[in-house]
Image: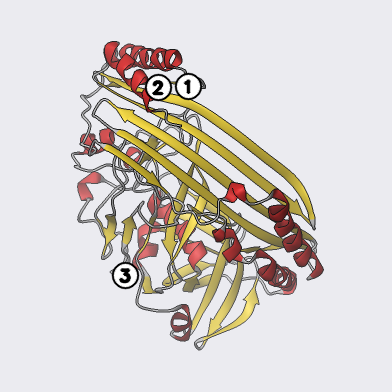
Amino acid sequence: MSHFDEAYSAVQAALDAGARYADARIMVRRTEAMTARDGDVEDLSSDESAGLGVRALVGSSWGFYAVPDLSDAAARAAGRRAAQIAAASATVPGPPIDLVPAGAGEASWASDCVVDPLGVPLSAKGDLLVRATAAAREAGADIAEGLYQIWDTRKWFVSSDGHRIDQHIRECGAGVSASVIGDGEIQRRSWPSWGGQHGTRGWELVDELDLIGHAPRMAEEARALITAPLCPAGETTLILGGEQLALQIHESVGHAIELDRILGWEAAFAGTSWLDLEKLGSLRYGSDLMNITIDPRIPGALGSFGYDDEGTPATKRDAVRDGIWVGVLAGRDSAAVAGLDYAGSVRSDGWARLPMVRMTNVGLEPGPHTLDEIIEATDDGVYMETNRSWSIDDRRLNFQFGCEIGYEVKNGKRGRMLRNPTYTGIGPKFWQSMDMLSSEIIPWGTPNCGKGQPGQVGHTGHPAAPARFTNVRVGVHG
């Protein structure tokens, strides 16, 4: 079933009401999620939502209006209302706003999916979580938890520039964790990461995670952490696992290069950025090994799509090349304000929310090493993996992260286990210290990126691999 006609009606109504540009998105989304605990299903939820959101541009001001009604009359009313809101805002004019081109045309796109996640029987999905959490309990966990999440989204987009695009995006993911209660503390181990791994793929992604096979090891490691020595404090060589480095990218690169933050548009809630547009193309962000791309075309990654919510085709761009900051995440309006000629990074988390600049797949290109080679080349350091906590200032500069597990590295070998490992640093200084990077890239998915007022939850991807950093402060406690 197509909803282009309703979207077209909304756009035309906005234009008739005085808008110089308008676009409309119709979204129909089905979701499903399940959690299990200690061998029993704990919660099951499913939902379906459908509606239309309209943007209208009058003068230098946007108006937005959304309705949970896909009738032609409701669409036209929403278009008129969006234009009225924009006109009211335009009575207090701001700087002129133009929109960079978005390659208007007709198109259709769908994410790859071998096994439809919503087509897998609930009994099979529940059995997976029950067996995985039971396996963790049998291996010594005091608390074992498992989850899966599914999103099935269909979009129809029409704009006054001539866009007519439909997309079908299927996403899912799962994970399992084991916790052990000690004397005054709890230690947790998670597979494949805290909250699981997610992507724009079918249920085959979950099958590949082998939750049941990895659950016992998570329990054994969590119990071993209870009696492991505390991560020592000091400055040392730090090796990060790929999953932790993905979050490091998300927090200290991805958010920092969002153009709306750089321009100050998100200062009230999400914060700003330490980056200055005048230094785009010349600022040293990291070492020569640091090559960060913005690429929503990566097959199966959680931040992938065919077109963003402004109709801009998915395109790969550099954000950091050979350590130099060269690109941003932008929308059509913010790019024009900044004097850039590209956009492509605008999305909303549903039909009822105004699209904004969001991360797509922001991640590292492969390095020349392997994790084994990195460890073998390290005389004295600490290896950490799997995020446990994070904190970063509102300019995305100063940070502190905690991981679930650490290991001493001595004379090129991984040694004793360390509990409560943490590290801290300042973004550019940290990235400039990266001197080894693995080629073992995985596009880690983050399905819980928060931003905006009202708040929106974004799905982002972060290709990352293990890497080494020198002279990093670790073991920060309290």
Marks 1 and 3, the one that precedes in the sequence: 1
Q: Nearer the viewer, residue 6 or 369?
A: 6
Marks 1 and 2, the one that precedes in the sequence: 2
Marks 3 and 2, the one that precedes in the sequence: 2
Q: Whole-Å distance between the Cαs marked 1 and 2?
A: 7 Å
Q: Secondary structure at mark 3?
A: loop
Q: Whole-Å distance between the Cαs marked 1 and 3?
A: 50 Å
Q: What residue sits right under mark 2 in the picture? A: 6
Q: Secondary structure at mark 1?
A: loop
Q: Quadrant of residue 100?
A: top left
Look at the numbered discs 1 and 3 and tell me whether their residues touch, using CB distance below 8 Å. no
Q: How many numbered markers are drawn?
A: 3
The location of residue 37, given as percent across then percent down, is: 77, 54
Give the residue type at disc 3: Leu
Horizontally, residue 95 falls left or right of residue 271, namely left
Can residue 62 be seen in the rendering of this structure?
Answer: no
The location of residue 204, given as percent across then percent down, is: 55, 60
Pointer 1 local density, CA inside 10 Å: few below 14, some 14–19, many at least 20: some
Q: What residue sits right under mark 3 in the picture? A: 289
Q: Is residue 410 above or below residue 232?
A: below
Label disc, if present, on residue 70 of the rendered structure: 1
Give the residue type at disc 1: Leu
Horizontally, residue 263 falls left or right of residue 399, namely left
Label disc, if present, on residue 40 of the rendered structure: none
The location of residue 198, given as percent across then percent down, is: 53, 54
Colouring chosen for the image of the structure: secondary structure
Can residue 138 be seen in the rendering of this structure?
Answer: yes
Q: Is residue 201 above or below residue 156?
A: below
The location of residue 47, given as percent across then percent down, is: 62, 35
Give the residue type at disc 2: Glu
Q: Secondary structure at mark 2?
A: helix
Look at the numbered discs 1 and 2 and tell me whether their residues touch, using CB distance below 8 Å. yes
